[in-house]
Image: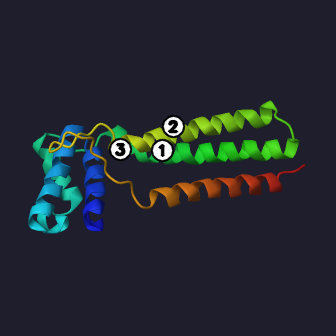
Amino acid sequence: MSATLDSYRRDLLAELRKRSVPNQRIAEAIAEVESHVAETGEEPQVAFGDPGTYADELAGALGRTRPSFTSRMLGPVVAIAAFAGAALATSGVAARLREHAWTSSSTLPIVGGAVLLGVAFIGGLRSSQGMTDPRTGRGLRVPASRWALPVAAAVIAVALVAVLAFRAAAPR
């Protein structure tokens, strides 16, 4: 599969999820795009148009014209949970290193941060679960954005730097 098709699939999936289109219809739409591109060699953007516009058409046919509140909030909630989890965990590790012993002041943030990072991870996985390719019957997986890992690493690095900076600036 080409990078253009992968990108189009990711964008179409995100747009259809925002509009609360059922998973099976999303799988069918992605399969239609893949089949058309494989048969004609035409670029998906040329054949189907902008992923957002195409998603509007598909959702409109199902009577779903507006993205649901929960689907609009999933991304920000996952990002906040990831940042808060990383900040809590790094704060706990910094406290652990400063105290040289496991105490409640270091254990609780580490556990809380791990729980929040778990919530963020599960929320991030939600985007591609439960879809079956109608052509093969196998699970349909849409590749994650190539920015997912660098953004996650950056969030954790920023949280670590922020915690260490606040610790260094705090009065002793």
Check disc 1 and report the residue beneath it. 78
Tally of numbered discs:
3
Q: Earlier in the sequence, mark 2 or mark 1?
A: 1
Describe the element under mark 2 as helix, strand or loop: helix
Q: Earlier in the sequence, mark 3 or mark 2?
A: 2
- Residue at horizontal 17 percent and vertical 50 percent from the top: 31
Describe the element under mark 1 as helix, strand or loop: helix
**Of circles 3 and 1, which is in front?**
3
Where residue 124 appears, x then y in whole percent? 43, 44
Residue ranking furthest to the top:
104
Where residue 164 appears, x then y in whole percent? 75, 54
Q: Are marks 2 and 1 in contact (CB under 8 Å)?
A: yes
The way the protein has been coloured in the rendering is rainbow
Check disc 2 and report the residue beneath it. 119
| Nearest to the observer: residue 67 or residue 25 | 25
Left or right of residue 153, residue 23 in this image: left
Where residue 117 appears, x then y in whole percent? 56, 41
Q: Quadrant of the N terminus?
A: bottom left
Left or right of residue 71, residue 106 in this image: right
| Mark 2 → mark 1, Cα distance in angstroms | 7 Å
- Residue at horizontal 27 percent and vertical 50 percent from the top: 13
Name which residue type carries label 1.
Answer: Val
